[in-house]
Amino acid sequence: MNYWLIKSEPKKYSWQQFKKDKKTVWDGVRNYAARNNLRDMKKGDLAFFYHSNDGMEIVGIAKVVKESYQDPTTTETAWLVVEFAPFKDIKKPITLEQIKKEPSLAKMDLVRLARLSVGKVTELEFTKVCMMGEVVFD
DNA sequence: GCCAACGTTGGC
DNA sequence: GCCAACGTTGGC
């Protein structure tokens, strides 16, 4: 199982909207590093859902429900989409500020590669964020 | 193959 | 609204 982080501006597509939709196609990624991360996602992988610009915090966890296939919004064959479903809310959203202050999280892709819209998350980082956010797994 | 110019993202 | 970081493009 691998862990990821996907970013969205809440004005464009928020966690709340995502929950209403129950499922979404993550399209429009036009960056090779981000595309490679989409390509490497496996069904069942978990991804933090981060609100960029507005909020600047991790608000939930999404689950990969369909692995990558060609992005239907473009004819260019280079681009991929992945389908996600909401998995869990984060009771106490983790802000970028908290992440930067926490030494074990300060090196996350989210911080180091600020402009990358689909980043990797290590298992340690994933566990730490869940702890800080009081995420309960049943 | 280098690099300047330009565009985009996202934090502040 | 500004600007830093970074990716992409195109001229040479």
Image: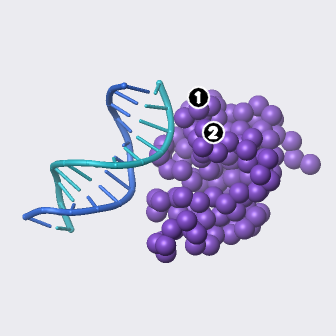
Chain colours: A purple, B cyan, C blue
Residue pictured at 67% horizontal, 46% vertical: A49
- In the picture, the disc for residue A97 is 1
- Image quarter where the N terminus of chain A lies is bottom right
Q: What element carries label 2?
A: loop
Question: Which sits in the foreground, C2 or A130?
Answer: C2
Q: Which chain carries label 1?
A: A
Q: Which chain carries label 2?
A: A
Locate residue A52, reporting x and y percent.
57, 38
**Residue A105 horizontal side relative to residue A74, left or right:** right
Using the rendered view, name the quadrant where residue A23 is placed: bottom right
Instruction: Give the crowd class for mark 2: few <14, some 14-19, many >=20 residues within 10 Å.
Output: some
Locate residue A125, reporting x and y percent.
66, 45
Question: Which sits in the foreground, A75 or A118?
Answer: A75
Quick one: which residue is furthest to the bottom in this view? A77
Does residue A98 appear in the picture of this structure?
yes
Q: How many labels does the image show?
A: 2
Does residue A108 appear in the picture of this structure?
no
Locate residue A100, reporting x and y percent.
56, 32
Front label number (1 vs 2): 2
Q: With respect to residue A120, does A96 lie above or below?
A: above
Residue pictured at 80% horizontal, 34% vertical: A91
Quick one: which residue is furthest to the right in this view? A138
Residue pictured at 64% horizontal, 45% vertical: A13
Q: What residue type is labelled 1?
A: Glu
Q: What element carries label 1?
A: helix
Question: Which sits in the foreground, B8 or B11?
Answer: B8
- In the picture, the disc for residue A110 is none
Q: Distance between the residues labelled 1 and 2?
A: 18 Å
Both marks 1 and 2 on one chain: yes
Question: Which sits in the foreground, A84 or A101?
Answer: A84
Q: With respect to residue A93, does A75 lie above or below?
A: below
Residue pointed to by mark 2? A10
